[in-house]
Image: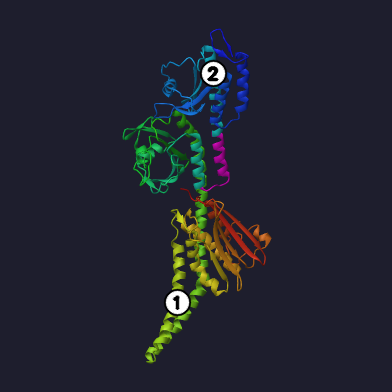
Amino acid sequence: MKQDGEGSPRPEGGWGDLADHLWRFRIQYREGRDPDKILRGALRLAMELFRAPEGCVAAIHPGSCEARILQQTPDEAGWDRRLMSGFLRGDKVAVPRDVMLARIRRHGRMWGVLAVRSPGADYFWDARQAFSTIGGLANELIEQSDLQRIREVRARVDRKVLEQSHPKHLSYEVLHGIRSLIAYDHSAALLIHDAEAGVLEVVAEQVAWRKAKGENVGRKFPLKASLQEVLAQPVVLGFDRDGRGWSDWAGGGSTTLAEMLDYDRLPRKAAFAPSEGAVLCASLITREGLLGVLKVASIHPGSFCAYEVELIAQFLPQAAVALQNARRTETLERRMIDAERKHAMADLARGVSHDVNNALGAVLPLVQQLVHDLEADAFDPEAATADLRQVERSIRVCRRIFGGMLNFAKGSARNPSDVALRQAADSALTIFREGLERRGVALTVDVPADLPRLFAVQADVEQLLLNLISNARDATGPGDAVTIRARAEAGRLILEVEDTGSGIAPEDLARLQEPFFTTKANGHGLGVAICRSIAAQLRGQLDIRSAVGEGTKVTVSFPIGGGEGR
């Protein structure tokens, strides 16, 4: 180690080597995507260059008086966190002669401190200038990393749009993108505007403090006319909690929106829920008007500033258009499913008519015989009991069939819930079981009741099973078999509907999932397409394997814990 004229320690080779070290550092991290790695690299460079045995990176969190140590070498080194906090705030502080500090700027504010220490050293102006240069280069590379992350998030949303993602999936992709851009530590939510009902509905929510999807999905909040006027323009509003209420710092002029969206202010039952201290509310605007609202919340007041406002303002137009297009696709898809449900009801009615006729046909002669015996005073209690039991069985068959059809017809509510595959299969089989047995088709059901549940719309899961079982029924005859099985495997829920029927020709199998393609004389070609759509809504995959004369096997796999979003 050499000393300059004023006593500052220098690395061997003098300060002339600094430019070469900085150039190598820039080359190494210019494509960096992780600011933490850039900071670790800057700290390592500074400690090597100045032969400092101690170093650290510290950051100050909004709402905190002291900086917190993010990384340090060695682990047992002690640092004056109040000193670093004052240095970050621009206070007049006395930095020890053996310590050098450099400010790290992120997200439009002074974010953290890069520090090195060499006990007994005496750092003068030239050494501190060189150290500040390292900090400045780290700032530059971190800014480039943040800009690249913004471009990647936008590209990811664009890709989801091109993939025609379901609105629920796209909504969570938007929230995930916001999470990677803005360091919020409470939650984020998307609320869609229902103009006819005059409400905002939570359609997607992520909770950062417990790393989970939210429990507020489906909640609706009346949107006052005054707030609708505020949100009619593409604005980003910022609020901080001030005591018990909210204060507006972004110039929106009203705290009513923050009060309405402060729906987590009441404690959760048997669970800790930190209060929101800072909120950003942004309107999603399209040519058709207000689409919805994006809400981002942090625990500590002062967590957000003009940087986050500008970032969201740049991101929102793309997100609004993407969500609008996805919702249009969803509307068309929903209409197609509704049409399929109506067609399925007619198809089911035709399919079960023979079973109902058989059941009622057995009832009529038995009742007529009972009436005749009573009139002829030839009533035989033992024979009558046997006849009445047969009548009871036939009526139960009719009740079971009609009950299943009524449940299917009524099951149009769109509220997602925990759906058990076994229950959905039993519901579908109340309609088909009698017909399969009558045709001499062996039915095997292996769907354990304790399988993980799907978070989905009950009617959609039943529709999926009805379509698959109906297709299996139509392809089978006497001596064939239909098997329905389900299992959990490698983090996925696997559902299989297999038959040993006529099978599908290779040229037809290739087109089977196309809408309106059918091999049935009275088919409409939407059944399998609907199954594929329902599977996609649940982030699932549908696979069909078939061979002529050997049968068909349809496999649908769902991620455990996935679904319509929660």
Residue 372 lies in the magenta stretch: no
* Residue at 44 percent of width and 20 percent of height: 87
Residue flagged by tag 2: what amino acid is it?
Phe
Instruction: Give the quarter of the image for residue 296.
Output: top left
Q: Is residue 294 visible?
A: no
| Colour convention of the picture | rainbow
Q: Residue furthest left?
A: 244
Per the image, the residue denoted by label 2 is 131
Q: Residue drawn 55% across and 71% down?
A: 436
Task: Using the image, determine if residue 457 lies above or below residue 355.
Answer: above
- Which callout, 2 or 1, points at the residue further toward the start of the chain? 2
- Residue wearing tag 1: 393
Stretch of the chain drawn in magenta = 150-166
| Total numbered badges shown on the rendered structure | 2
261 relative to 460, above or below:
above
Residue 511 horizontal side relative to residue 122, left or right: right
